[in-house]
Image (cartoon, rainbow, N blue to C red):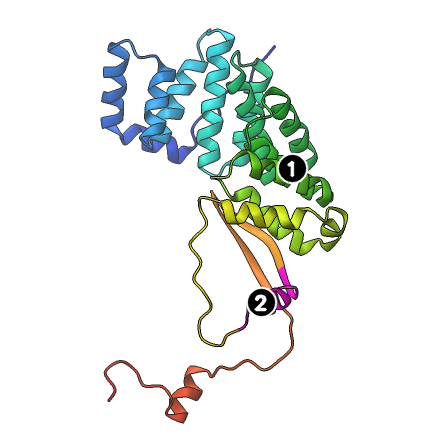
Amino acid sequence: MTLPTIFPLSEDEAAHREVAAGEVEEFAQMAAAGTSPVETAEIYAQMGWDAGALSALQTQISHDIDAQARARCYRLAGEIRERLGEFEAAARCYEAAVAVGLPDPAGRYFAHNNLGYCLNRLGRHAEAEACCRRAIEIDAARFNAHKNLGIALEGTGRPGEAAVAYRIAARAQPRDDRALRRLRVLLVNHPDVVRDQPDLVDEVEALRKSSPNRRSESGPVGNGPNEEDVRRLLLDIRVAEEVAAGELQVFGLFWDRPGELDYSTLDEALAGGSFRGHGDP
């Protein structure tokens, strides 16, 4: 069987590799000390030398190595490509790792889970669902695959099932609130899920209050709206699709509630004398 390569370096990466004399010297020293190319690549990846890491992996994969080492190369290359935002290349690396097979359960779990994550980022949600379910079969206690399964289920138009997956993920890892945030957004966008799973709102609130990441809340200030008023106002808010950049996820909020907005433009404020710039009397 012909196995895919570790995606040879792009021209820019290859040029970087040629001029990075310090990395070349470091690589030579590690090789002389008996450090394998895979171990060298792992060190390079930890230090942020992605081009050097991929070059070391390409060197290793070109040799006749056993299946375990080959799968390890593919998985590490996938992690690097994923971190660089190259999800298509990362997915192909993870697919190769899965095809070759990793001997340890944790390695198999993360190869399937990470592949599911990349496929979600590529909009291939049905394929991502299968990968996440395979990861859960390997280790159902970890939260990552449940969260990514929720994303895949949302992507295939099954918000009720997605809510269940997010709930499991939020329970499994309270310190990582990504699944809980996604679940809260899902409930705003899909009131029917709340109707079908009436206990979900109370559990979400309990999970939110118990989250270690939750900031302390202060009491009401002045004569502003109370909590019930705020809840009613929030019913009119629409949550847009996420915009992601690496690990950062941003959700746009839209409020169609009619009414006059109490503000003035800068020109209006200056003309009316209600605003003075820095240094004005």
Q: Which residue bears the numbered disc 1?
A: 165
Q: Residue at x 56, y 39 (%)?
A: 170
Look at the image and say whether residue 234 sits in the magenta stretch.
yes
Quarter-of-image position of residue 270? bottom left
Q: Residue furthest front?
A: 219
Q: Residue at x 58, y 67 (%)?
A: 230
**Element class at badge 2:** helix
Q: Is residue 275 above or below residue 121?
A: below
Q: Residue at x 56, y 59 (%)?
A: 252
Query: Foreground: 265 or 55?
Result: 265
Q: Which quarter of the rendered picture does the N terminus lie within?
A: top right
Residue 122 visible from this viewpoint: no
Quarter-of-image position of residue 17? top left
- Left-right relation of 224 to 42: right
Look at the image and say whether residue 105 sits in the magenta stretch.
no
Q: Position of residue 47 (x, y in %)?
A: 31, 30
Amino acid bearing label 1: Ala
Residue 50 visible from this viewpoint: yes
Amino acid bearing label 2: Val
Q: Residue furthest bottom?
A: 272
Q: Residue at x 71, y 53 (%)?
A: 190
- Alpha carbon of mark 2 to alpha carbon of mark 1: how far? 28 Å
> Which numbered tag is attached to residue 230?
2
